[in-house]
Amino acid sequence: MTNDQRRSAYLEEIGIGPVWKRRSVQIEAVPEPKPRPEHIVEQPVAAPAPHDDLLFEPAMPEMETHGSSNYDPAVIARMDWATLKETVSGCTKCDLCRNRTHTVFGVGDEKAKWLFVGEGPGRNEDLRGEPFVGQAGKLLDNMLLALGLKRGDNAYIANIVKCRPTDAAGKDRPPTAEESAACIPYLQRQISLIQPSIIVALGKTAALSLLNLRPDTPVSKLRGTVHTYADLPLVVTYHPAYLLRSLTDKKKAWDDLCLAMATYGR
Ligand code: SF4
């Protein structure tokens, strides 16, 4: 099976089918990002739900230390992989440590050129200690395969926060600004160690956290644009969990991945 045939098979499995196949050919022939059509500027505003792209508290205020004795951003910024993993596994910096089963550090090729960043672990990830498992994880894996990547091979997957955020009913929710601010030094160190060539932010929460943008930043200013994080190109697309609920946006997600591919190629 050729690479094109394999990619087509993955896109069919995702549910995009021949539309995605045609898009991939067009994008490869036209390296410049396409202007965003008006009809995709406004994203659907769904009711609050776990991992929803549209839920976010983006400011990064200072916060009180909950009790982690090893937490020092200046020290974290110099840690090696082993020390960083050990520190995260025992971290009690914010209240998310209280209800976690496992910290979810990240997974993949530690020298990957592609880094994918989500917002935080959900129930399945908390139980497994691995990011993006379950149906959303399967969709992300298919998105990686469509890019010619796979988990652990030139791709690394991480989250803004390493512990599962839950609401009062015990359901998944996006991390707050305080939780994101507490945890992001770990991700920053992961990025420094990995030294990727491109970052793909999965969802608005991840994008706004990494880019330190205001919460009222419209989605139209996030998708379809190549941003910069620490001199690295950053492309924003939908969170896979959101795509599972909004099938019509899969085509837009493919546009985003094509933009990422073109950017990586340059
Ligand atoms: S979410 Fe991050 S900062 Fe908060 S306890 Fe977990 S590892 Fe520590």
Image (spheres, rainbow, N blue to C red):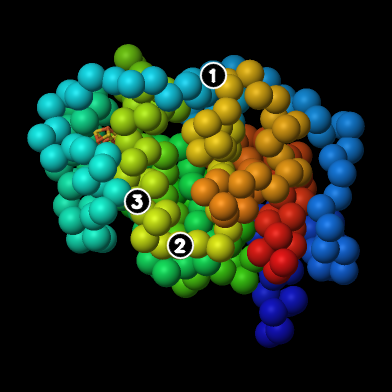
| Residue denoted by label 3 | 189
The mark that comes first in sequence, 2 or 1, is 1
Evaluate whether residue 230 shows in this view: yes
- Is residue 227 left or right of 134 when viewed as pictured? right
Q: Residue furthest top?
A: 168
- The answer to which of 39 and 241 lies nearer the viewer is 39
**In 3D space, how far apart are the residues under numbered discs 2 and 1 (Cα atoms)?**
34 Å
Q: Quadrant of the C terminus?
A: bottom right
At mark 2, the secondary structure is: loop
Q: In this view, does 146 lie above or below 239?
A: below
Q: Residues within 10 Å of mark 3 (few under 14, many from 20)?
A: some
Residue pictured at 39% horizontal, 30% vertical: 180
Three-letter residue code for mark 2: Gln
Residue 189 is situated, as x and y percent measured from the top left of the image, at 35, 51
| Residue denoted by label 2 | 195
Three-letter residue code for mark 1: Pro
Q: Which residue lies furthest to the bottom in this view?
A: 1
Residue pictured at 65% horizontal, 44% vertical: 227
| Residue denoted by label 1 | 48
Do the numbered discs 2 and 3 sit on residues whose CB atoms are within 8 Å?
Answer: no
**In 3D space, how far apart are the residues under numbered discs 2 and 3 (Cα atoms)?**
10 Å
Q: How crowded is mark 2: few (under 14 residues within 10 Å), some or many (20 or more)?
A: some
At mark 1, the secondary structure is: loop
Q: In this view, does 157 lie above or below 113?
A: above
Residue pictured at 56% horizontal, 63% vertical: 197
Residue 32 is situated, as x and y percent measured from the top left of the image, at 84, 58
**In 3D space, how far apart are the residues under numbered discs 1 and 3 (Cα atoms)?**
31 Å
Residue 114 is situated, as x and y percent measured from the top left of the image, at 54, 62
